[in-house]
Amino acid sequence: ADAKKADRMHVVRPRRAGSASDWRLIEADYMYSCGIRSEGSLWCWGANIAGKLGDGSVEDRSAPVKIGATADWVDVVGADFIACALRKDGETNCWGGQKGGAVVYPHEAVNKKPLAMTLRPTMLDGSSEAKGENPSGDALKLDQIVLGDVHTCGLSGGKVYCWGGIPERMGRRNPPAYEPVSETESSVIEIDSSAFPSDASVKEITAGSRHTCARTAKG
């Protein structure tokens, strides 16, 4: 039994995942993968620890399974035990387990299906006053999302917003503590862009387990 399990976990030759040939985006992380097909449907497969495949179960999947009924997904990212995806309208969805508040639902919570998140900007003093392009405090719509091990960042309108643990990874020395507003809502911190050229908006972000980087429009 152990030998068969090891064979499933370690594939020494390339093996096709499913039968589809119209994959537009693939994301691979710790023992699982997710992908978006050309028509916008979202699929995941692999180890389903803490429900990180998003299919409503904790069963491992050896072939891609469709996640949800919608077909308007544009981006998907994964970390050890969590995954997040963006829909065409910028809505953020996350699922799986978490640590350190990397996702917006309460610490140690587990969601086995994509859960729509409401992200609201906050000032550094912890007030609810919004900044920049979102003066009313309306929920942010993200253009891109990235995951670290205990932090998450998103790009919206050329500005970077982060939430989770470990202040330095979010570009701040002393940000307000992570506090989810509710199961599906959280305050997020706008990252100080004073180090960037004044006329250069951020075009792309990336995150490692312990750091975050950004590329501006000027390169």
Image: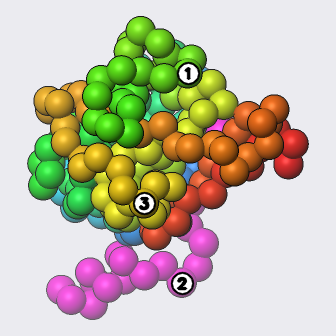
Tell me: residue 46, above or below residue 158.
Answer: below
Q: Can you identify the residue that label 2 sits on?
A: 12
Residue 27 seen by the camera: yes
Residue 67 position by quadrant? top left
In-front residue for pair 151/1: 151
In the displayed structure, does residue 72 sit left or right of residue 123?
right
Residue 149 position by quadrant? bottom left
Q: Can you identify the residue that label 3 sits on?
A: 173
Q: Can you identify the residue that label 1 sits on?
A: 132
Labelled disc at residue 214: none
Tell me: residue 14, above or below residue 212.
Answer: below
Q: Residues within 10 Å of mark 1 (few under 14, many from 20)?
A: few
Q: Magenta region: which residues?
A: 1-24
In-front residue for pair 208/69: 208
Residue drawn where x is 66% and y is 44% of the image: 194
Residue drawn where x is 52% and y is 43% of the image: 191
Label 3 sits on a secondary structure element that is loop
Q: Position of residue 84 (x, y in %)?
A: 40, 42
Q: Residues within 10 Å of mark 2 (few under 14, many from 20)?
A: few
Quarter placement of the N terminus: bottom left
Tell me: residue 218, above or below residue 91.
Answer: below
* Mark nearer the N terminus (1 vs 2): 2
Question: In the image, what residue type sits under mark 3?
Answer: Arg
- Camera-near label (1 vs 2) is 1
